[in-house]
Amino acid sequence: MAVPATVAAVPASLYVGDLHPEVVDHHLFEAFAEFKTMDSVRVCRDRVTMKSLCYGYVNFKSQQDAIRAMKLKNNSYLNGKVIRVMWSHPDPSARKSGRGNVFVKNLAGSIDNAGLHDLFQKYGNILSSKVVMSGDGKSKGYGFVQFESEESANNAIEKLNGSTVGDKQIYVGKFVRKGDRILPGYDAKYTNLYIKNLDSDITEALLQEKFSSFGKIISLVISKDDNGLSKGFAFVNYENPDDARKAMEAMNGLKFGSKNLYVARAQKKAEREQILHRQFEEKRKEQILKYQASNLYVKNIDDDVTDKELRDLFSSCGTITSVKVMRDDKGISKGFGFVCFSNPEEANKAVRSFNGCMFHRKPLYIAIAQRKMDRKTQLNLHYAPQQTGLDGSSTPVIPGGFPPYFYHSVASQMFQSGLLYQPLGLRSGWRANDSVPPTRSFQQSQVPNFTRHHRQNRSRMNGNVNSLGKAHSGVYIPQYYQAVEYLAV
C-alpha cells in the first residue's frame, strides 16, 4: 500500500542492531546515504569505555524514506555482519514487556534472520526477528520474533508449534524472561540425562551398552577436549521420559569402572545458575541467623597481624569457628577483620575483654558484626534526633540572645561530652530563652566547632581555653568557658 503524501513530512527514527564492534558513525551514514531525507545517525557507545554497544539509530525527515530503508536494509550486511533494522521504540516499558514476543528453538542451521522473518511474516506485522549466532557466525538453533500485536504472536504459536521446518520439528512459544521462568518440579517430563564421574577409558560403546537396558536411546555423546580425550562427563537422550527416569534412579551412585556415577536430569545453564543462586542465598541466610550474635568485627588491626596471631589472641575467650583478616588484591591488610565464635556468650566475653586493648602497638576496636543494611538503619536512627534539632523541630534550653543555629551545635557537644553537669535552665540567673545578656559586648558570627581530639595535649587545650571569647570570632559563653577551664586545670 502506498504511503500518503502527508506522511512524507513526518520525521521517523530507525533502530539498527547487531552492528559490528568496529562500525562508527560515518559507516552507518554511508550505509543509509542513498535515502535523501536521512537527517542524522548515531552509534551508541559506553559512557566509560567508549566502546560500541553494537547498535545505533538513523533519523529521517520523511517517514516514507524510513519505511523504504527498513525494507531494503533489514538483514543486509554491514562490515561483514548482518544487521537488523526496525522502528525505534523510545518507551522502554514497551520493549521490555515481552508483549508479542515469540521464542523459537530447534531451528535448522540454514535458517538465518531473513529465513525466520519469511517463516513468520504471514501471521502478522513483524517488528523484529533474530536468530542467535555463536562467535564464529553459526546458528545456535534458536531465535526470537517480535510481533506488533499479541494476537499475531498467539496465532503464530498455534500454527507453527510442533511443525517441521528443514527436517526438524521446531518449538514455538511465548518468550519468558529468565527471572520469571519456573523451575521444573520433580514430576517434570524429561528425556536427556547428564552423567559425570566417568573414567577416562570409558567409551561411548560401553556407555551405550550400560544404559540401553532401560529403553531406546536417541543419542549418546561423551564430551571431549581438543585432543580427543574424555572430559569425564556425557549426555544420554532417551526416546521415552519414563525410561530416562528409570535410568537415573537405577544408575545414580552406582559404581562404574573405578568411580561412582552421578546421573541427573540435564539442565540448561540458566536453570543451573538459578538453582545454585537459590541454594547459595539459602545457605547464606542460614549462616547469618546461626552466627548473628557470635561474629565479631575487629578494627584498627596492625598491618603485620596474621590470621593465626588474631586467633591466638581471642582463643582464651572460647571456641573460634573462623578468623579472617581482610586483605586487598595484593595481600596487604585492610586493617580490619572478623572473628567468629561458637556462641554469643563467648563473643560478648571477647568484646568485654579485648575492646580497646593494645595489640601490636595499636588499640583494637571490637564490636558485634552487623550487615551493611542493619548498620545503616542503626546509624540513621542514631543521628535522627540531631537532624531533627538542626531542622528546628526541637528547642534546646539556651540563654536568650544567641541565634538558634548556634544553640544546637554548641549545646549538643556540651551535653554529649559531659562538660555540663547541670541543665542550663536550672542554674541561678538563667532561664530558657530569657536571660540577662552578658555585659561584655561581642559580635555574632559562625560558631567554632569545639571538638576534643584523642591526641589533643594539655598545651593545645590551654591554648583553646585562653583564646575562648577572643580568638573564636569573639563569642563568649560563661558556663562553657568555666567547664573547659575546669578540665584544663
Image (cartoon, rainbow, N blue to C red):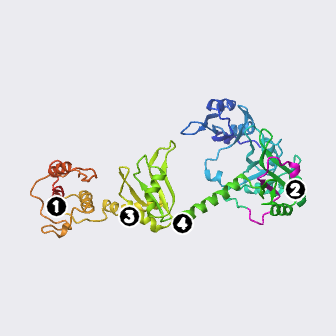
Q: CA distance from mark 2 to mark 4?
A: 45 Å
Report the disc number at residue 210. Answer: 2
Q: Quadrant of residue 133?
A: top right
Q: How many marks?
A: 4
Q: Could you say where residue 194 lies in the image, as x and y percent from the top left?
A: 78, 54
SS for dot 1: helix
Q: Amino acid at mark 1?
A: Gln
Report the disc number at residue 452. Answer: none
Nearer to us of marks 4 and 1 is 4
Residue bounds of the magenta highlight: 184-206
Provide the residue designation for mark 1.
479
Q: CA distance from mark 3 to mark 4?
A: 22 Å
Residue 196 located within the stretch drawn in magenta: yes
- Please identify the dominant SS of the magenta region: loop
SS for dot 4: helix
Q: CA distance from mark 1 to mark 3?
A: 36 Å
- Name the residue nearer the viewer: 489 or 479: 489
Q: CA distance from mark 3 to mark 2?
A: 64 Å
**Label 4 neighbourhood size at 10 Å, few (<14), some (14-19), many (20+)?**
few
Residue at the spot 81% in from the left edge and 50% down from the top edge: 106
The answer to whether the residue labelled 1 contacts the one labelled 3, judged by CB atoms less than 8 Å apart, is no
- Name the residue nearer the viewer: 27 or 206: 206
Provide the residue designation for mark 3.
352
- Name the residue nearer the viewer: 246 or 102: 246
